[in-house]
Amino acid sequence: MRWLFPILFLALSHTGARGADFMYDEEVVSEAAGQEEPRKTVRRIHVQGNLQRVDRRIDASGEAARVLQKRGESLDTATILRLDTGQVYELDNEAQTYVQQKLPPTKPAAKSIADDPAAPVISFQVKELPDTTRLHGKLCRRVAAELRARYYEPGTKEFRKENRYLYMAWVTEEVRGYKELQKFKDEQARQTSYPSLLGGGVDQLRGAVDDVDELAAKLEALQGFPMESTLSVYNGPQDKKKQKKIFKLTRRVTYLTYPPPLYQRFQPTKQFQPTKQFQQLQP
């Protein structure tokens, strides 16, 4: 059932959250094969203890906006996760309504694909490059990861196709609270199957294939808060030069602050113009 905003504001006026408290804006651009034009989304992420709010606005106009609205997709939405109460609020800022529901329980552990004849052969490598730069005053280092999933005809060595996922990012450990942010993601994964609202990390590769046992250990080399990242997906023969790019996701942080200022005093960046309905999570 959908409710009007005023009830939601009362429900979230006293949360009692403590812990990490910081906010950042990011710009996410996705490009897919066959897609007429890239889709840009601006997002504001506010994390405070066991609470998280993510506002999203799809930057679309004209025919692109009409197509999305025809599909029933709002261009201006937000999601509030409350791990303390096990609730999620999904807001439609255009209609000024929201849906409240319980967070779904975690799903049973996936079965191992080791004995599945149709399972892909996985290879995964990470690399920390010598490059450094400063973004928003933070010293960042460049990291890369590549996951290759090769598919063969079941029971044979006849090659069918390869999916290749290439991730590159500028990461920093100078953002206070990034470890708490990871703890939030870990706690969310422990409590519920509701998908993570955070992007930019190499954990985007986790959903590429099932049961990659060595992935967790190798991710340690990429610890840090991603200020900019790109995830590209390729498909085709084993020869990289003949593969086609079927998807690209680019993300960059445009604003970062901690603790967040009062909303009334906040001057938004040009890339993000919040609606009147935007409300910070209260301490």
Image: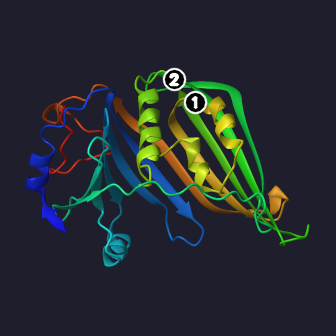
Q: Quadrant of residue 61?
A: bottom left
Residue at image position (14%, 63%) is 3
Residue ID for mark 2: 173
Secondary structure, mark 2, is loop
Q: Horizontal placement of 128 versus 89: left or right?
A: right
Disc 2 versus disc 1: distance between alpha carbons?
8 Å
Residue 241 screen position, x and y as percent: 81, 58
Q: Is the C terminus in the top left, top right, bottom left or bottom right quadrant?
A: top left
Report the number of discs: 2
Q: Nearer the viewer, residue 118 or 61?
A: 118
Query: Quarter of the image holding residue 218?
Result: top right
| Residue 198 shows up from this direction | no
Give amino acid for label 2: Glu
Direction from residue 102 to residue 123 in the image, left or right: right
**Label 2 close to label 1 by CB (< 8 Å):** yes
In terms of sequence position, does the residue under pointer 2 or pointer 1 come before the other?
2
Q: Colour scheme of this structure image? A: rainbow
Question: In the rendered image, which residue does mark 1 sit on?
Answer: 223
Q: Position of residue 13 (x, y in %)?
A: 12, 40
